[in-house]
Structure formats: C-alpha cells, structure tokens
C-alpha cells in the first residue's frame, strides 16, 4: 500500500510539473470511474440505470474541471503529463481496492501511519533531487502531520463500511473542498464550472450510497 501511495504521489507530482494543471487534476480524479468499471467487469456491480447515471455525472464533473483555463494539450510534454496523471489514477484505484479489502483485519491508525511512512521513504529521493529550503520542508512536514495524517486515519476507519467505488466517489470531494478553500482566500478562483462539478460529484455520491442501501 505504501508502494502504491509512493507511485501515486510521484506520478502526480511529475504530471503537474510537465502537463496542463486542469487536465492533469481531472485525469488524476478518474479513479472512481475506473473503480466502477472494475466493479461491473468483475460482476460486483450489475449494470443498471443508476450506475450508468453515476458514471455520466462523474465524467461530466471531471470534464468541467479539465475545461478550465490553461488546459492546453498542444505539446508532447502536455500529453506525457496526462499519461502520468492516468498512471497516478490507476495507482489510486489499486490502493483503494487494497485498503478496502484489508481495513477490517488491521488497526486503522497503525495502518495509515505505516502507509504514509513507507510512501515518505520511497519519495524522499524526489525531495533530495530538487531545490528546497529547510523552512519550507519543515512547514510542509507539520502540515502533513496535522492534516494528512489524521485524514488517513479517518479514511482507514471509514472504508471498513464502504465499497471501493463509493470510496472513490467520496474521494472526489477532496478537489471540491480544496476549490472551496481556495475560493475563501481568492474569490476569483471560483467559477461556475467548478461549482457545478462539485454538485455533480455530490449527486453521484448520493446515488451510489442510495444504490448500496437498496
């Protein structure tokens, strides 16, 4: 799991470095679609009107994110960045499947800590190969410990009661919340497509939970 987390972080960082940010972020968020298709492929989720609507909602939401200004795909680097983002999404997909299958048998807090620790060790070469300063690294370490650490611990507890596709769909709200927080700081960053994509994601999550309750 730490290996998949490390691959996810590395590919996503590389994708953002060379590709158009809106498209890269959108493609990185395609893991819920991959999970739904996998569930249908393996027979865990029968094809139904509800799942088709859910796929369409997620697809439109991701398309809206990808259509933001700066989404230029006119260069080889941009295409490479998109490929890396899809690789990142595939790593997230594998990670979600593993975590949902293992979470019932393991201590969630310990598992979350080990997953992040292994990923941190694996991605340390990325830190050493770039220009950085001690103050910024310390700040990011504190933010990670205060926010990402507890987030992973809660995540491990939550997935005990959810299907992989539901976990992936709920995970899309991360981008929505991030956009909302950015909007608090700088209102010019909030646009109607971003707001609409958030509504579509929330609707897809509710449909998925409603389908599960049936």
Image (cartoon, rainbow, N blue to C red):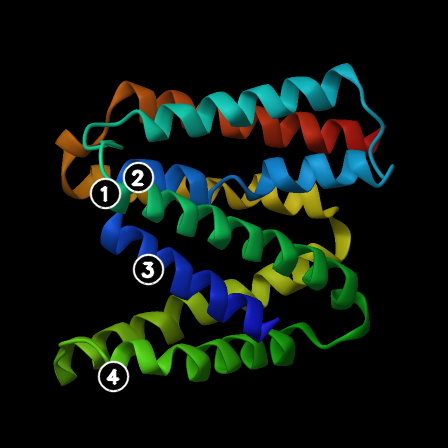
Q: CA distance from mark 1 to mark 4?
A: 29 Å
Give the foreground label among 4 and 2. Answer: 4
The answer to whether 42 is drawn above or below residue 131 in the figure is above
Question: For mark 1, what is the residue?
Answer: 182
Can you tell which mark lies on residue 94? none
Q: Residue at x 13, y 76 (%)?
A: 131
Could you tell whether 33 is left or right of 124 in the image? right
Q: Are marks 4 and 2 in contact (CB under 8 Å)?
A: no
Location of the N terminus (image quadrant): bottom right
> Separation of disc 3 and disc 4 at Cα?
14 Å
| Badge 3 or badge 1: first in the primary sequence | 3
Residue at 85%, 39% (x, y): give it: 44
* Element carrying mark 2: helix
Which of discs 3 and 2 lies nearer the camera? The answer is: 3
**Which callout, 1 or 4, points at the residue further toward the start of the chain?**
4
* SS under mark 3: helix
Residue bearing mark 2: 179
**Residue 104 coordinates in the image, percent (x, y):** 80, 66
The answer to whether mark 2 and mark 1 are in CB contact below 8 A is: yes
Q: Is residue 70 above or below residue 8?
A: above
Extreme top residue here?
Answer: 49
Mark toward the start of the polypeptide (4 vs 2): 4
Q: Residue placed at 82% from the left, 32% from the top? A: 213
Q: CA distance from mark 3 to mark 1?
A: 20 Å
Residue named by callout 4: 128
Q: Nearer the viewer, residue 135 or 59?
A: 59
How many marks overall? 4
Q: Which residue is denoted by mark 3 in the rendering?
A: 13
Whether residue 86 appears in this view of the structure is yes
Q: How many C-alpha atoms fall within 10 Å of the one at disc 4: few (<14), some, or many (≥20)?
A: few
């Amino acid at each position: 799991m730490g290996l998949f987390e490390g691959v996810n972080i590395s590919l996503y960082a590389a994708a953002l470095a060379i590709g158009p940010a809106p498209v890269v972020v959108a493609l990185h968020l395609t893991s819920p679609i991959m999970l739904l298709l996998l569930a249908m492929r393996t027979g865990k989720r029968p094809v139904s009107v509800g799942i088709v609507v859910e796929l369409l909602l997620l697809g439109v939401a991701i398309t809206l994110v990808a259509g933001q200004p700066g989404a230029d795909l006119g260069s080889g680097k941009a295409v490479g960045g998109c490929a890396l983002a899809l690789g990142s999404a595939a790593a997230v997909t594998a990670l979600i499947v593993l975590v949902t299958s293992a979470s019932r048998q393991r201590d969630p807090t310990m598992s979350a800590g080990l997953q992040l620790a292994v990923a941190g060790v694996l991605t340390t070469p990325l830190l050493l190969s770039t220009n950085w300063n001690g103050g910024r690294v310390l700040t990011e370490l504190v933010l990670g410990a205060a926010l990402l650490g507890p987030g992973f611990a809660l995540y491990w507890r939550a997935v005990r009661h959810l299907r992989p596709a539901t976990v992936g769909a709920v995970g899309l709200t991360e981008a929505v919340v991030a956009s909302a927080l950015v909007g608090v700081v700088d209102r010019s960053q909030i646009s109607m497509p971003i707001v609409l994509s958030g509504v579509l994601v929330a609707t897809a999550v509710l449909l998925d939970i409603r389908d599960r309750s049936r």
